[in-house]
Structures are given as structure tokens and as C-alpha cells.
Image (cartoon, rainbow, N blue to C red):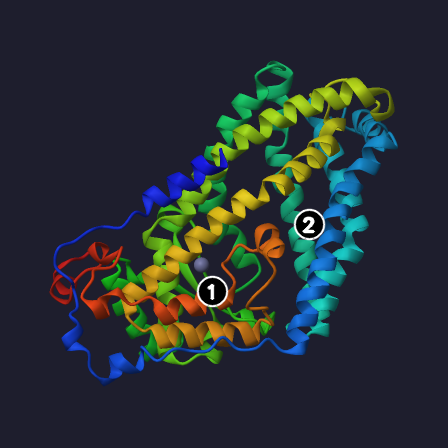
Amino acid sequence: MAALLIAVVITLQAPHESAAPSHSATSANSAESAELVPVPVPEPSERAMEYYRSGIAIWFGVQAWRLAIPAVILFSGFSARLRTFAKRLGRSWFGTIAVYLLAFYLITFVIELPLDYFLGYVRPHHYELSRQSLGRWIGNEFKSLAIGIVAAIAFVWIPFLVIARSPKRWWLYTGMLALPFAIFTAFVMPIWIDPLFNAFGPMKNKALEAQILSLADRAGIDGSRVFEIDKSRDTKTVNAYVTGLFGSKRIVLWDTLLANQNDKEVLAVMGHEMGHFVLNHVAWGISLGAAGSLILLFLVDRLGRWSIARFGNRFGFDSLADIAALPLFIFLLAGLNLIGSPIQLAISRTMEHEADRFSLELTHTNHSAASAFAKLQRENLSNPRPGWLSVIFRSSHPPLGERIDFCNVYHPWTSGLSGRYDSLFRSGTEQSKRAD
Ligand SMILES: [Zn+2]
């Protein structure tokens, strides 16, 4: 399955062969040759390595903690008692589920608060990566809690209804519902949810914006899709991302990136984000995720039934249709997701690498792209060469060392060869004619 998914991604991004090279080696001028000067991968600071090593230890702790909480709630019989309480208060089928979810979310919020505080506030401040005030951090925590409760009450009853109606095939029907649900979530996220946390607007630096829009036009992207976000309120780290689907699809630039990098470096980073945009990586991620969720839910069904047959007496329920089984679902999903994460992360790294390639082919600014990554490494305290186990289980992006190496060596246009994505770019004359 893993191989199949990866094969799909790679086939999708197979090279577009074109006869005529778009740029010839002879046209290289001094600006172009300056962009071919390699950038050495910076040595990580002692602090960055400490951040990396402690990050691995914390990763193990977090995984264990995420499995331990639902396991304790289950095996102590607490979930069943909570359901009995919810039934008394909520009366109806839906009322029981709503009260249970509300109580469950509040209780787990309190249990997880110390860890959230450590990971989201103490640790980033200790490493001087955060600028967030405690008040803002607390505000965001409560916003997330409120969104979680509203979303849970709005949607979690659906699989429980499906299980009650079709105890044998629920995993298939729920898995089929996962795709429209994921599409809906991806669509509303940038317009309903993200603005609750940060302000999004057009770019403030108009000269740079004009350059970005011209690059976007060449990549075939409508300029109204570029936003600047006030991340400097929260963090010193730098980033940019692509989000949304259909009408809500957009490229978002952190203002910290703009403060930290020169124009050409920003353009190289934007070229990468444009790659995600044009190659439809969000939609591919959702489709592959939905396919994966069918397998995941099938396994949850089998393991869930087995767990109830084996430990049902201690859990205090005898059916997956009982809302008291929620922590069992959470436990199984967390465990299976952990096991499946190397596949998911490998697909993500493939997409990230292709976005890097897209950027280089679009901009031809290898030196600027590499120096943007070198700055990213320093600002974000990254280890450019993490261990392979860390890459397999924790890295959604290729290590920065590899990304810089790739920028240093990948320039097929200097040998008169065409790039994988050349056919997707608009030429200068097309730009003024085409409008979409
Ligand atoms: Zn990316």
C-alpha cells in the first residue's frame, strides 16, 4: 500500500519532456552565474543540536502520553461512568453524545494543559523562538478548545450513528465520508478558522509584492491568492505555506520571513509555495489521506472489536456504537497513525522535494534558494543533518542539508536540458495575454 501511494505521487510528478530548452547556457550573464555559486550547509549551533536532541526525547514522551491518556480513561472504566452521567443529563441519543463530548473535551483539556504549556510556551521561549505573550497563548488555547468542542459536537455523532445502523460495514461508509469531510475542512480552514488566530492581509511591501505577483503569474497563479500573516506576534521562526481548496486556496507568507530574508530569497521561498499550489499538493494530500483512512478505519474496526471482546468488562461497554468507546477510537487511531506516519511523512517529503525543484526551475536562483534555507536553518534552530530514524518518524520535509545540497547541484538549464515543470510555466509573452 505504501509503495502504491508513493508510486502514485511519483507518477503524477513524472518529468514533462519538451524538445526545446527554455533557456540556453550561452545566455548566462553575471547575475545568473552568481546564482550558481554554491552555499555551504551551515554547521548547526550547539543550541540547535540541544534543541534537536531534547526534541527527540520529548517526541518519545509525547507519543507515550498520547496513548496513555485514552488508555487510562478506558481501563479505569471512567469513560463508561462518564457516558452514564451524560445519559442522565442529555436524555436523548444525541443529547448523551453532546454532553459526553463536552465533558470529555474539558477533562482531557485540563489533563493535557501542562504538556501543552510546556511544548507551546515554555520550550519555544526557552530557546528564544517565541515572541508570544502568555495572555495570547492562553487566549489561543481557549479558542482551540472552543473550536474543538463545536467541531466534535457537529461531526462526531455521525460515525456513531453509522456504527449503530451498520455495525459490520461502518468503517467503509465512514471512510467514504472522510473524503467530503476532509474537503470541507480544507476549504473552510483558511476562511473560518485561521483568521480567528492571526490577521491575514495583502502584502505590505508593494515593490516586493509586484515581483511575487509577476512570479505567480508566470507559474499560472492568480495574484489575489497571496496573503501576508502577522506571525511576528507569535514567533521568531520563519515560514510560508499553501492552504485551502478551490476558492479558498492561497499562499500565505509569514511576516517574519519578510523581515529575515532578502527579496530574491523570499522569491525562492515563494517559488516553492507556488510549486505546492500548482502541483495541487493540498488536494493530493487529502485524496491520499482519504484512501489511507479507509485502511485505518478497517483496522480500527477489527482491533476495536477484539479489544471489546477481550477487555469489555473493564471498559464497561460492549459495542463500538457506544459513545463510551470514543477513547478506544482515539487510542487505536493514535497508535495506527504512529505506525503509518513513516508512509505519510515520506509522501510529504516527496512533495516538498518536488516543490523545491519547481522553485528552482521557475526562478533559476539556486544561490538565493540555498541561502534562504541556510537562514531558515539558523532562525528555526534546525539540525541540517538529522539521524535517519528521526527523518523517518518526524520529518515532513527533507533535511535542510539535503535541500541546500540539491539547490547547489540542480540546474539542468545550464546544460541546455529542460526541467520537469517547464511546460507548466507561462512565457513572458503569454503572461500579458492570458487572464484567469
Ligand atoms: Zn513546502
Kindly indicate the quadrant of the structure image that contains residue 419. bottom left
Say which of 305 and 318 sits in front. 305
How crowded pointer 2 is (Cα within 10 Å; few <14, some 14-19, many 20+) is rated as some
| Relative vertical location of residue 36 with respect to residue 323 in this rendering, above or below | below
Quadrant location, the C terminus: bottom left
| Residue depicted at x 81% and y 49% | 111
Judged from the image, the secondary structure of the residue bearing numbered disc 2 is helix
Q: Is mark 1 within 8 Å of ligand 1?
A: no
Q: Residue 203, how many percent across, how many down?
A: 39, 72
Q: What is the residue that sits farthest to the bottom in this orientation? A: 30
Q: Ligand 1 lies in which image quarter?
A: bottom left
Q: Is mark 2 within 8 Å of ligand 1?
A: no
Kindly indicate the quadrant of the structure image that contains residue 425. bottom left
Residue for badge 2: 145
Q: Are marks 2 and 1 in contact (CB under 8 Å)?
A: no
- Give the number of the disc on residue 402: 1
| Relative vertical location of residue 61 with respect to residue 8 in this rendering, above or below | below
- Residue 183 can be seen, yes or no: no
Three-letter amino acid code of the residue under disc 1: Glu
